[in-house]
Amino acid sequence: MKKNKSAFITGITGQDGSYLAELLLKKNYTVHGLIRRTSVLNIDRIQEIIDKYEKIRKLKIHYIDVTDTSSITNLILKYKPNEFYNLAAMSHVGISFFTGEATLNINSLACYRILESIMKNHKSCKFYQASSSEMFGSSKPPQNEKTEFNPQSPYGVSKVAAFHTTKYFRQAHGIFASNGILFNHESPRRGLNFVTRKITHSLARILIGKEKKIELGDISTKRDWGHSKDYVRGIWMMMQQKKADDFVLSTGINYSIEDFVKKVFRILNLDWKKFVTTNNKAYLRPSEVRNLKGDSSKARKILKWKPKYNLDDLCLDMLKSDLKLYGMTLDEAKKIAKKL
Ligand code: NAP
Ligand code: GDD
């Protein structure tokens, strides 16, 4: 009888990690979530699966910082996972300008150390690296697997290093190590300081009178936004291939931040200009990635992957969820909006 698979996920408490864990558990994997110790337990996004799967031993949580190589090695030796998804990161581009060294330690060196440990201790383990469209930086769109990397931030630099590290272990040591080069993907679980969630969450707070304005930085930059649920499915598909490789995941359509703001405010028939200020210095970056638009034809052809959500679905999903957080339905929010 075929044994069920097991997987390690670093970054399981994050947006993608939580959706990926749900997907793997539904596929009957045993999932090991590696989480760092924090003074306040940060497991909101995975509380539901902990309640459902921990007691039946399909989900195991281990306190391990991704930079703690010896502990990761011990865990690999103990559980010999089939697949290792490395999603942990200092994932905020703007913050990386102030935390360069930590960003490289978490995002680049940890990737190297994990791969070295896999090579020495459990060579058959498949490895996924969460690479990013931020690596393309100033390269012209549409960007695909052949586009040159021109990173514009410490975050971008750190992800380029991890990308090449992953490729190196694949080419030099025969490890199954794949890079997913993912364009921006969002969801109701997106962190509050990324621009999309900041907009939907702040709008909900404006409706209940807790905020007056949404202060943004540069809203002329363009991003290719998809839904995290679609993208974690693509990640899993990459790991089911016979051969490791690198794949772009994107929708192929991009919009400016201003377009996103307009779409969200239009749902409630509100004039965004009354509630949004722009070019706030606190959110401007020393260098920007101006225009991201992915060409994911390789993933669509080889993996047979394609996204189900478009940007309108995504905006609605995120806004509805933030309204619910503050006890409002969409219809109630529309009524309140009329009085603003
Ligand atoms: P996220 O929500 O910010 O989650 C990041 C995860 O990494 C969290 O679970 C965080 O733990 C964990 N982490 C950070 N530092 C750690 C450390 N030292 N030790 C252990 N865990 C640590 O990010 P995401 O949006 O899910 O993205 C997942 C991955 O994909 C990241 O590597 C990101 O860079 C990459 N990526 C994301 C996108 C996107 O648009 N979302 C696009 C391309 C690539 P805490 O919960 O304790 O903070
Ligand atoms: N966060 C934020 N906050 N961004 C703002 C704001 C603001 O108030 N105002 C304007 N922006 C602009 C940023 O300058 C950037 O051009 C764009 O909105 C998107 O910013 P983020 O949502 O922070 O995402 P990101 O594109 O920098 O990075 C995300 O996508 C990458 C993939 O391309 C992150 O998820 C990265 O981890 C990921 O690799």
Image (spheres, rainbow, N blue to C red):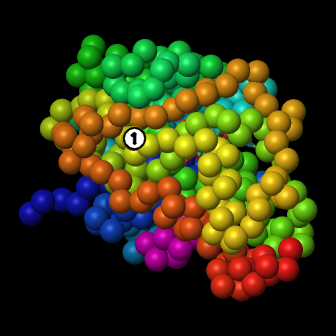
Number of residues whose C-alpha sits closer than 10 Å to that of mark 1, classed few (under 14), some (14–19) or many (20 or more):
some
Specify the quadrant of the image occupied by residue 13.
bottom right
State whether residue 247 is above or below residue 49: above
Q: Residue sitting at 39 percent across and 19 percent down? A: 147
Specify the quadrant of the image occupied by residue 167.
top left
Residue 218 visible (yes or no): yes
Q: Nearer the viewer, residue 29 or 208?
A: 208
- Horizontal side of residue 120 vs 9, given as left or right: left
Q: Residue furthest left?
A: 1
Q: Give the extent of the magenta segment.
A: 44-53
Q: Residue sitting at 72 percent across and 56 percent down? A: 199
Amino acid type, residue under disc 1 in the picture: Gly
Residue 302 locus on image (x, y percent)? 18, 39
Residue 61 locus on image (x, y percent)? 52, 58
State whether residue 236 is above or below residue 152: below
* Quadrant, the C terminus: bottom right
Q: Nearer the viewer, residue 199 or 55?
A: 199
Residue 328 visible (yes or no): no
Q: Secondary structure at mark 1?
A: loop
Q: Is residue 37 magenta?
A: no
Question: Which residue, given by chain and number where applicable, does mark 1 sit on?
Answer: 252
Residue 329 locus on image (x, y percent)? 66, 83
Q: Residue sitting at 41 percent across and 35 percent down? A: 294
Determine the main secondary structure of the stretch shown in magenta: helix
> Ligand 2, what quadrant?
top right
